[in-house]
Every structure is written in C-alpha cells, then in structure tokens.
Amino acid sequence: MALIHSEQTDDLFRAVLSLRSVEECYRFFEDLCTVKEVLALSQRMEVARLLRAGGTYHETIAGTGASSATISRVKNSLNYGAGGYKLVLERLSGEENT
C-alpha cells in the first residue's frame, strides 16, 4: 500500500468526491491550498495532457512554463505510475470505455 494511504487521506478524498461543481471545487481548494499549490496542481494536469497528446519536452515547457523536473516527474507517472492521470484524462476527453 502506498505511503499516502491513511484515514485522513481517505477523508480528504471523500471530501473532494462530495464536491458537485467546478465552483464548489474552487471554494474548497481556495480554503484548503495556497494559490501556488493549486496552480502547481493545475500545471501538472496540463503537462500530463500535453505529454499524453504526444507533446515534446520543449513544447510542454513552452506551453506550460513547467520545469524540466516537473515534466519528467509527470512523464514518469504517466508511464509507470498508478494510472491516475490516464484515468482522469480519458474521462475528461470522453475516451473512457467503461
């Protein structure tokens, strides 16, 4: 089991799952995180989207302003991670078959 698994983390994820709109997400994450943290998370999602679409490191840096370390971390997660980016990106693009 990954190190992040705990009752507190379960509660956090249940809280996120209880949100019903983008506006509710803005309200919750504004209270939960700093602006910088939310922007970093959204940048990682955009990096994942661009890499999954076949973007190069240079294109991804240009498109997001992300560091090469962030791009490398996201790319490793896309290739060897738990599949979370793939799951979410498929759902957001309507590709999911299940």
Image (cartoon, rainbow, N blue to C red):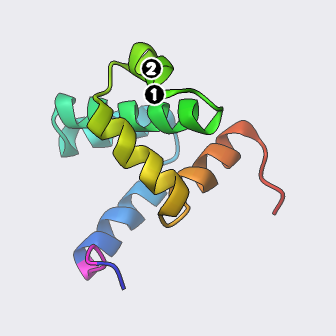
* Horizontal and vertical percent position of residue 92: 66, 40
Please report contact status of discs 2 and 1: CB closer than 8 Å, yes or no.
yes
Mark 2: few, some, or many residues within 10 Å (few <14, many ≥20)?
few
Position above or below: 17 against 43:
below
Give left or right: position of 94 versus 74: right
- The chief SS type of the magenta part is loop
* Horizontal and vertical percent position of residue 32: 20, 46
Instruction: Kindly identify the amino acid type of the residue bearing the numbered disc 1.
Output: Tyr
| Residue bearing mark 1 | 57
User: What residue range appears in magenta?
Assistant: 3-7
| Residue bearing mark 2 | 58
Position above or below: 7 against 56:
below
Give left or right: position of 48 versus 66: right
Q: Going 29% across and 41% down the picture, which residue do you hit?
A: 29
Q: CA distance from mark 2 to mark 1?
A: 4 Å
Task: Decide which of 91, 27 is in the foreground and name it.
Answer: 91
* Horizontal and vertical percent position of residue 73: 35, 48
